Image: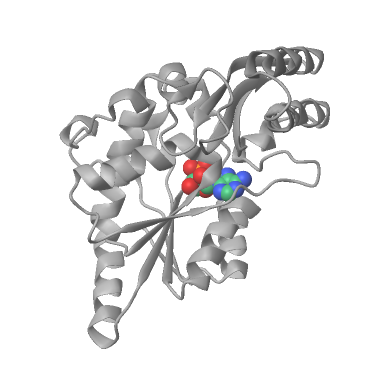
Amino acid sequence: MVIFKKAADLQHFIDTKRAHQSVKLGFVPTMGALHEGHLSLIGASKKQKCLTVCSIFVNPTQFNDPEDFKKYPSTLDADTEALLGAGCDILFIPDILEIYPDGFDAVKSYSFAYLETIFEGAQRPGHFQGVGKVVARLLELVQPQVLFLGQKDAQQCLVIKELIKQMNWEHKTSVSIVPTVRNEQGLALSSRNLRLTEAEQKQALALYQSLQLIKAAKTSNNFEHAKQACIALLHQNNCELEYLALADAASLQPLSDFDTHKDMMAIIAARVGAVRLIDNLFI
Ligand code: AMP
């Protein structure tokens, strides 16, 4: 695995490879503190026989909460080892000046319409603007043929697909979405789980249990009734609910009740102690 800090060096390396052979470049953007979820994206890229680039960059513009940014875990040595083990070809670890050489405001902003007003968009004002900026910059620098994203961040997947459309890059970069990796009990792996105590990790299982409860209610109950049971479960487990909703799986437009003619998704965000967690499930 080769490691680059400078975009120009990364681009030179990729150009040299391309000069000698046809290369399909697979790109996995991350914020580090890597776990099996991230590594499954690397695995998906390798499976598609891509020359695989992983970036680690904790993007300040997508944190609406400065404390969350400050506390974001950093485990670069372990990340490098894990990427080596997963067969990643290239690790890109830019500093902030590589990504934002002329400041944050110099990077073009994109608008994601209703996606910025629901769920994560509503709870984290400015978050998707920041995601749009960093992903647009990274795509320009890396120029991948395939971008690998995790289903765990379902709304982010839609935002990035919309970004690629607005950049007129659909012919250049396709998006491949990889299923959520969970621990044995069902907790979705997340870098933020590192900040949960052992007791909180157990309490956090209530998020996935809620999603499953909603899935089980699909044919026998109405959504509001199922949601009330989830609220009680989350409360018992000291999880402070931000939202728990039913949505059209393709658009994430909220649904008021189960509609078995549609592909649906249950989507949740809750705080467990000081840590904010999100999850979702196709139902
Ligand atoms: P992050 O480092 O949190 O920005 O995540 C980088 C990428 O990994 C994003 O595309 C996430 O959706 C994906 N990802 C994070 N957690 C998981 C997981 N548990 N399973 C699959 N993909 C994940």
Q: Which colour scheme is used?
A: one colour
Percent position of residue 29, x then y: 43, 51
* Residue 34 shows in this picture: no
Query: How many numbered markers are drawn?
Result: 0
Percent position of residue 203, x then y: 79, 25
- The residue drawn where x is 44% and y is 34% is 155
Residue at the limit of the structure toward the bottom, as seen here: 20
- The residue drawn where x is 35% and y is 43% is 160
Among the 4 quarters of the image, the one containing residue 237: top right
Among the 4 quarters of the image, the one containing residue 86: bottom right
Q: Is residue 7 left or right of residue 200?
A: left
45 and 264: which is toward the camera: 264
Q: In this view, does 279 lie to the left or right of 216?
A: left
* Depicted 236 relative to depicted 115: above or below: above
* Depicted 197 relative to depicted 191: above or below: above
Q: In this view, does 229 lie to the left or right of 247?
A: right
* Residue 100 shows in this picture: yes
Percent position of residue 157, x then y: 42, 42
Q: In this view, does 259 lie to the left or right of 183?
A: left
* Depicted 175 relative to depicted 72: above or below: below
- The residue drawn where x is 67% and y is 40% is 188
